[in-house]
Image (tube, helix red, strand yellow):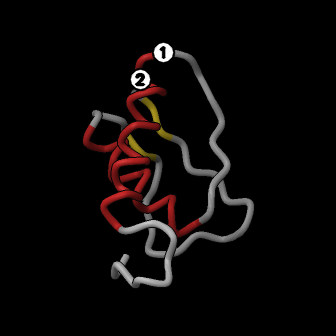
Amino acid sequence: MFNIHCQKESRKETLDRAEKFVEMIVEKEEDCVIVTHGFFMHTLIDCMKKQDFQISHTRSGYSNGECVIGKR
């Protein structure tokens, strides 16, 4: 998030990866389950909202195994 140089991926690269992933989901037009790290989930949810997904709930933190539903 802060573009720390010891991280393998910059914030922009993370955002690009999330945007491409959401585009892939939209193109397939199928139901899917996504399992991801909680920190990446925030970026992914933001990208999904930009693609008109309705998100069941958003929080500043998520618990392990928590389910978030996005519908388009």
* Whether residue 52 is situated above or below residue 11 in the rendered picture: above
Q: CA distance from mark 1 to mark 2?
A: 5 Å
- The residue type indicated by label 2 comes to Val
Residue 67's x, y, as percent? Answer: 64, 52
Question: Which of the pair 47/17 is nearer the observer?
Answer: 17
Q: Report whether 61 appears left or right of 46.
A: right
Say which residue label 1 marks: 29
Residue 18's x, y, as percent? Answer: 42, 47
Mark 1, other Cα within 10 Å: few <14 / some 14–19 / many ≥20: few
- The residue type indicated by label 1 comes to Glu
Question: Which of the pair 5/56 is nearer the observer?
Answer: 5
- Which residue lies most toward the right here? 65
Residue 25's x, y, as percent? Answer: 48, 27
Residue drawn at the location 34% of the way across and 49% of the way down? 16
Query: Which picture quadrant has residue 12?
Result: bottom left
Q: Quadrant of the N terminus?
A: bottom left
> Are discs 1 and 2 less than 8 Å apart at CB?
yes
Query: Which picture quadrant has residue 57?
Result: bottom left
Say which residue label 2 marks: 26
* Whether residue 44 is situated above or below residue 38 in the rendered picture: above
Q: Report whether 11 appears left or right of 59.
A: left
Residue drawn at the location 29% of the way across and 34% of the way down? 51
Residue drawn at the location 33% of the way across and 47% of the way down? 47
Residue drawn at the location 52% of the way across and 75% of the way down? 61
Residue 58's x, y, as percent? Answer: 43, 61
